[in-house]
Image (spheres, coloured by chain):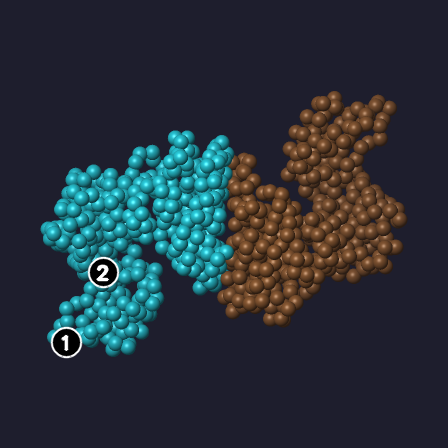
Chain colours: A brown, B cyan
């Protein structure tokens, strides 16, 4: 029996009515003759509500107990999903991560999937049941632990790999991957395909389509991913390996706008070897994610500045860590700027084609949009601009790169 | 190390603030040198909210999936409880029923505890941890199932028995067992002790202090139960075995008023052997609880009536089953009366002392309260009266039996 792995995100199972619709899609796939494994997230805001409960108990809950708490969200999701299938006459069973044979390691809050023992899932599939598996969790030494990075997407990709399905259907409230956020850029176009590398860069650029870690695993184990809408029947975007024919080309696939980051700057750092390493080590110790590290060229004064972007949610933690480093380095001060946005173009072959970066800078200049920071790789160019100008920048770039017309479709 | 088993009901852990207070009581017990096992219920209305979610999926959810769903309520309770302990510097760990070694049998929704493998609990106790165990659940063949009767109280009593503690502290929103509901009868008095038999009769009479099944288990395994308030420090009521000195006495301990039942009557049943058995069998097949079965004396006509009381929640199911039996017995019709209340006196030695029943009937007559049905055993006398007169009946009986003065205290 061929097996389909489907994953429904929190917004796709936010209430009983949406769960019914998701169940109907799983049943339709089952009736086509596939064995169906469905990875289900916690409904709607349930995970956040549980975390809020925990924070009312203590500002820093114990990791093991927080996992014991928040894994109930996915357990609620799978049981409601299996009920909905059974109520429609399709046999189904829900399995928590531990029941599904998902063995994890690494400890509470930051576990990784070690191995998936698929015997129990296969037994239920053989009996003709739709198997609803709780995302984002596994068993470690009798405890239920959450998967630190990648969440439910990672569970789905890992199951597709363990069950050798070759593909994985990711259902969410977006219809696929677009050339830019269609809520901002109205002529944005849905892509039929995108490469793993581009998806990784989009995740780094702040487009919240899928978790980066799940993409890495999908690429490594050859699982094609289909990102599609839970609420519309039509196909979405396939995430695929790079074709050889694409290697020589240079083009922009998609744009991203990230308004969830702040800019941090350590001002007046002595120009000595090892300074940047000290700054980054301090941030790593506090688990602060960092993007676009820029060190200004040393001025005549013998001091320079180090700037980077970090998520708003880590800003205070980062500032505290930096202030301690700044003191020990005898730097002048630490600046925090919240009024910034990061606009990025993601694609391939950028290094061979400086035209792509040049197009970005001139398009922004034409709109009189000031660029605070620039960073570029072979797959991405990002500019930091004023927060108020972020959406204008996105629209201008979509036009400048001719993305509405679409060389790829 | 001596071990204390404490149980906190849903109202005692209804919100994070109440969980903090419950945790403080567990920590105080731990600091006295006891090993502490805490059975925790689902916070507040969480179980009902989860059932409502399920009913929005389907009116008759699958039992196995409903158990997978509602057991998350207790899991939320234990993890928040353990977090609260740890935040106060007391080491703690939460264990679901399966993690705690509670092995069940009998299937989803109606499982019973088969055995408790206490090794995991003892290991954590030995390490000095407060162990928070999810009530109302156990493991059966890799599934998590709910205990059909007795709920979290039963988990607590069974743990007290398995850990050989000899006693079990049941914390809830009531201060103990009273001579009557103090919200209705203001001079009602808290009892220092009550026997298991009396508690069982009180449960049957509709006083919702503790589940009957847990009392039976406590009596069988010699676990004394302390029913007390989660919100007040003073002691409550001890549920104990009957002392020999009490055997010869006859007295009323406590009154109960039950407004949650309806009266069902099969009217005009032919007076033949086996008729009552057929009626009761039909109700048992539908799992309808029944109290006070009364068959009127056969009249000259050769037909009579069978009446009994059942919970409102089962009324429609019961009526449907009875109507089918009524047709096959050629009975006249089935009557359903919702405007009734059951008032009961519970105590001991009633058969030796007809004065106790007589006092009830004359006290109700003095208040011009009409009695619809009567049933009496050695431990309980119950009368069914009009719903509107239930509270007056309770007040009159409390006075008539002189319960405010209290021969026992």
Where is residue B260 shown, x and y percent of the image? 30, 56
The label shown at residue B383 is none
Residue A149 appears in view: yes
Lateral position of residue B27 relative to residue B341, left or right: right
Q: What residue is rendered at 27% in x and 40% in y?
A: B237
Quarter of the picture containing the C terminus of chain B is top left
Say whether residue B194 is left or right of residue A55: left
In this rendering, the label closer to the viewer, 2 or 1: 2
Q: Which of A218 and B314 is in front in this view?
A: A218
Identify the mark at residue B301; answer none if there is no mark: 1
At 29% from the left edge and 69% from the top edge, which residue is drawn?
Answer: B281
Mark 2, secondary structure of its residue: strand
Q: Distance between the residues labelled 2 and 1?
A: 24 Å
Q: How crowded is mark 1: few (under 14 residues within 10 Å), some or many (20 or more)?
A: few
* Camera-nearest residue between A257 and B158: B158
Q: Where is residue A215 in the image (x, y as percent from the top left)?
A: 71, 52
Q: Residue A63: percent from the left, percent from the top?
A: 56, 40
Which is nearer the N-term, disc 2 or disc 1? 2
Asked whether disc 2 touches disc 1, contact meaning CB atoms under 8 Å apart, the reply is no
**B359 or B379, nearer to the observer:** B379
Instruction: From the image, tell me which residue sits under label 2.
Output: B292
Quadrant assignment, res B173: top left
- The quadrant in which the N terminus of chain B is found is top left
Residue A227 vertical placement versus B281 (above, below): above
Q: Is mark 1 on a helix, strand or loop?
A: loop
Label 1 is found on which chain of the structure?
B
Of residues A14 and A338, the one drawn nearer to the viewer in this rendering: A14
Q: Mark 2 lies on which chain?
A: B
Packing grade of label 2 (10 A; few <14, some 14-19, many >=20) is some
Give left or right: position of B28 versus B346: right
Count of all numbered marks drawn on residues in the image: 2
């Amino acid at each position: 029996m061929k097996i389909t792995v489907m994953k429904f995100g929190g917004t796709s199972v936010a209430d009983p009515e949406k769960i019914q619709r998701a169940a109907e899609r799983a049943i339709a796939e089952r009736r086509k003759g596939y064995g169906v494994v469905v990875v289900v997230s916690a409904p709607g805001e349930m995970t956040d509500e549980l975390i809020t409960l925990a924070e009312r108990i203590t500002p820093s809950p114990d990791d093991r107990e927080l996992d014991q708490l928040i894994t109930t969200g996915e357990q609620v999701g799978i049981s409601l999903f299996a009920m909905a299938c059974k109520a429609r006459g399709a046999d189904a069973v829900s399995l928590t991560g531990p029941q599904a044979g998902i063995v994890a390691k690494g400890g509470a809050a930051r576990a990784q999937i070690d191995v998936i023992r698929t015997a129990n899932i296969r037994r239920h599939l053989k009996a003709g049941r739709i198997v609803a598996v709780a995302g984002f969790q596994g068993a470690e030494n009798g405890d239920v632990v959450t998967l630190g990075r990648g969440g439910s997407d990672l569970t789905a990709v890992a199951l597709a790999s363990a069950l050798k399905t070759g593909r994985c259907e990711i259902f969410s409230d977006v219809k696929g991957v677009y050339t830019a956020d269609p809520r901002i850029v109205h002529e944005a176009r849905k892509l039929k395909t995108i490469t793993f590398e581009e998806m990784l860069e989009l995740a780094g650029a702040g487009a919240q389509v899928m978790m980066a870690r799940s993409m890495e695993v999908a690429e490594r184990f050859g699982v094609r991913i289909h990102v599609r809408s839970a609420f519309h029947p039509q196909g979405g975007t396939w995430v695929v390996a790079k074709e050889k024919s694409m290697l020589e080309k240079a083009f922009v696939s998609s744009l991203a706008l990230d308004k969830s980051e702040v800019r941090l700057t350590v001002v007046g750092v002595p120009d000595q070897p090892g300074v940047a390493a000290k700054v980054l080590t301090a941030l790593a110790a506090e688990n602060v994610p960092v993007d676009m590290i820029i060190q200004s060229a040393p001025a005549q004064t013998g001091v320079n500045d180090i700037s980077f972007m970090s998520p708003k949610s880590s800003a205070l933690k980062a500032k505290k860590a930096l202030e301690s480093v700044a003191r020990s380095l005898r730097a002048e001060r630490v600046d925090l700027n919240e009024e910034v946005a990061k606009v990025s173009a993601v694609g391939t072959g950028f290094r061979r084609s400086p035209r792509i970066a040049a197009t970005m800078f001139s398009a922004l200049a034409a709109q009189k949009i000031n660029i605070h920071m620039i960073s570029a790789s072979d797959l991405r160019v990002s500019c930091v601009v004023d927060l108020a100008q972020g959406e204008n920048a996105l629209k201008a770039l979509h036009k400048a790169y001719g993305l509405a017309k679409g060389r790829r479709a």
